[in-house]
Amino acid sequence: MKRTFVARPDKAAIRALPAFAGLQRSQIRVLRGAEDVEFAARELSSATCVGFDTESKPVFVANQPPSGPHLIQIASERVAILCPATFAPGLDFIRTVVESGAVMKVGFGLKSDRAPIQRLLRAKLRSAEELSGLVQSLGYEQRMGLQMSVAVVLGQYLQKSKRITTSNWGAPALSDAQILYAANDAYASLRVFMGLTDRRIVSGPSSGPS
């Protein structure tokens, strides 16, 4: 018997949804100094599950290997922490989160993130949950990306700007638009995971690492 799948909403239907309720600029900290790292350590000290994502400077030359990630993002329910790849003290803190088995990292495309993260941090991404397949398990034929997942799980529209997506994530100073985009990619992943938890698709951080 042929299996029947749930229909994915089209682009027009997604754009008609209420805007994603993301973090505000005041809730986002870019790690640039010791006080920023101390803030991040305090804010995430009790976190058992965080949204996780990376951004890399686009490659426009054929056959040129990628050099990222240039930015790593971690989001809790209250704040997002952004760490440029050039800030060594921040990377030391990010490494503790990445290696922690007690903090679940949830996101999209984590499989492709593993090797670049290990190259940058000299650390393996532990206790990580890929969300694309979990959203698919709601009855869809294909795996879901972040924008589609926000639509079907949260009923909200996460705007994705190609101009910002392909911007220079290795720039010495990121724009506010880049900061908001990057932070809310990680935060949206956490919110999708929480939505799946509410639907009992997952049972929370205790569901185990992958």
Image (spheres, helix red, strand yellow):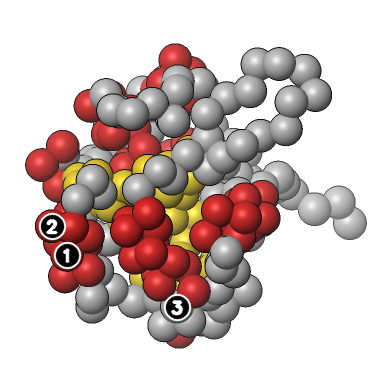
* Callout 2 secondary element: helix
Q: Residue at x 45, y 20 (%)?
A: 167
Q: CA distance from mark 1 to mark 3?
A: 18 Å
Q: Amino acid at mark 2?
A: Glu
Q: Amino acid at mark 3?
A: Ser
Nearer to the camera, 104 or 152: 104
Residue 93: tell me if it is visible. yes
Q: Amino acid at mark 1?
A: Glu
- Can you tell which mark lies on residue 38? 1
Nearer to the camera, 68 or 131: 68
Q: Which residue is mark 3?
A: 100
* Callout 1 secondary element: helix
- Against 140, residue 175 (above or below) is above
Q: Quadrant of residue 131?
A: bottom right
Mark positioned earlier in the residue sequence (3 or 2): 2
Q: Residues within 10 Å of mark 2 (few under 14, many from 20)?
A: few
Q: Residue at x 47, y 61 (%)?
A: 106
Image marks 1 and 2: residues in contact by CB distance under 8 Å: yes
Q: CA distance from mark 3 to mark 2?
A: 22 Å
- Can you tell which mark lies on residue 78? none
Q: Residues within 10 Å of mark 3 (few under 14, many from 20)?
A: some
Q: Which residue is mark 2?
A: 35
Mark positioned earlier in the residue sequence (1 or 3): 1
Give the x, y percent position of residue 125.
Answer: 56, 67
Image marks 3 and 2: residues in contact by CB distance under 8 Å: no
Q: Residues within 10 Å of mark 1 (few under 14, many from 20)?
A: few
Horizontal side of residue 96 vs 45, given as left or right: right
Give the x, y percent position of residue 45.
Answer: 23, 75
Quarter of the picture containing the C terminus is: bottom right
